Amino acid sequence: MAGRCPRSERNVAKEKLELVEVSPRDGLQNEPDIVSTENKLALIDHIIASGLRRLEAGSFVNPKKVPQMADGDAVFAGVPKRDDVTYIALALNLRGVERALGAGATEINYAFCASDGFSIRNNGATVEETFAVWPDVVALAKANGARVTATVSTAFGCPFDGEVPVAQVVKVAERCVAQDIFELALADTIGVGAPSDVHDRFKAVKAAIPGHVQLRAHFHNTRDTALANAVAAVEEGCAYWMVRSPASAAARLRRALPATCRPKTCSICSTAWASTPALIWIVRCKRRNSLAACWGARRLVWSAARRNGPNNKAAALPRRP
C-alpha cells in the first residue's frame, strides 16, 4: 500500500483481535421459520472450519417467547467436543443459567439492559430488579466450572426510552463487574451508535471498571455504521468483537481466515450481511500492522452492495486519510 498509516492507526494496529461468532444465536433467534437442530449444528461446523474458536451456540430463554432457541439442550449436546473451541450460552435469569450449565455450557453470557423500558420487555424486570440474582448467577456458574461474561444491552440507545446517558451505562457496568466476571460487553442493540458514541462510552466504562476485565463490543449494522464503530472500539482498547455471518458466507469464511491466523480476542457483534468477511479482513491486516483493512473492508462491502441492491451502502465507513 502506498504511503504510511498515521501514527494513531499504527498504534491501534498493534493490537491482536478475536472474533466471537454469534450467528447460531443472534443470527437465528428472530427467523420466522424454525431452523432444525441438524442445520444449526451444520452451521456451527462451518464456523469452526472457518477458524473461529469462540462462538455463542444458543440461548436458554423462555421457549414460548423465543421458540427458535427452544432446542438449546440438543444443540449443546450435539456440538463437536473440542478443547480449543468455547461454546457460549446466553441467559437472562437464574433458571436459564441452570439449564445452560445442565446442557454443558462452559461460558455463560448473562445479559442486562441499560434502560428500564427494554429491560422490562426483554428481561421481565427493571434494571435494578435484574441485579437481585446476579451474585447467585455468578456463584452457580463458578461452582460448575463455567466462566461468566456480562452484556449491557441498549448501551447506545433504547427503542422505548430513547437516548441512554453515558452515566447510566457506566452505572450498570459497575454493577456487572462487582461480581467475578472476566469480560464485559457493550451492545448497540438497535444499531443507533456512531463512532463518537463508541469512543465516549467505551472510554467512560474502561475508566470505571477493573483493568483485568476485558471489554467486548456488540454492534448491529442497522445504519451501516458497524464497521466504523468496530474501528472506534479498537481505538479505545476493545480487543473482543462479536460477529454474525450469514450462512451463505461459510465458504468465504474458510477462504478468508487461514488456519495459521490465530488472533487474540476482540468482540464486535457487527451483524451485517458482509460483516464477518470484512472484519476478518481487518484482523488479517492488523496482523501485518496496518489499518489498510478499513479500506479493504470498504471495498468488500461496496462490492456486496452492488450485488444486493442500492439500499446496501457503506457510506458510514471511514474515508482514506
Image: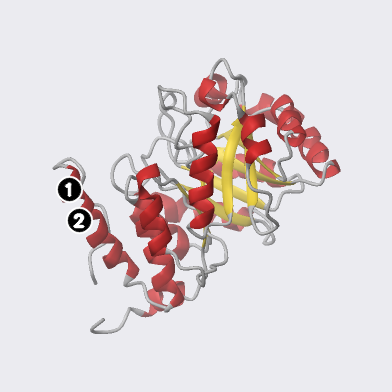
User: Mark 1 = which residue?
Assistant: 307
Residue for point 45% across, 58% down: 233
Which residue occupies the foreground of this view, 178 or 286? Answer: 286
User: Mark 2 = which residue?
Assistant: 303
Which residue occupies the foreground of this view, 198 or 17? Answer: 17
Q: Quadrant of residue 99?
A: top right
Q: Is residue 140 visible?
A: yes
Which residue occupies the foreground of this view, 120 or 285? Answer: 285
Q: What kind of residue is marked 2?
A: Ser
In x, y percent, where is residue 242?
50, 50
Give residue 47's mark: none
Give the secondary structure at mark 2: helix
Q: Residue furthest right?
A: 143
In this rendering, the answer to whether 152 lies above or below 147 is above
Which residue occupies the foreground of this view, 163 or 299? Answer: 299
In this rendering, the answer to whether 235 lies above or below 195 is below
Residue for point 38% across, 63% down: 255
Give the secondary structure at mark 1: helix
Disc 1, disc 2: CB below 8 Å?
A: yes
In x, y percent, where is residue 308?
19, 43
Q: Quadrant of the C terminus?
A: bottom left
**What's the image's color scheme?**
secondary structure
Query: Image check: 115 left or right of 161?
Result: right
Q: What kind of residue is marked 1?
A: Arg
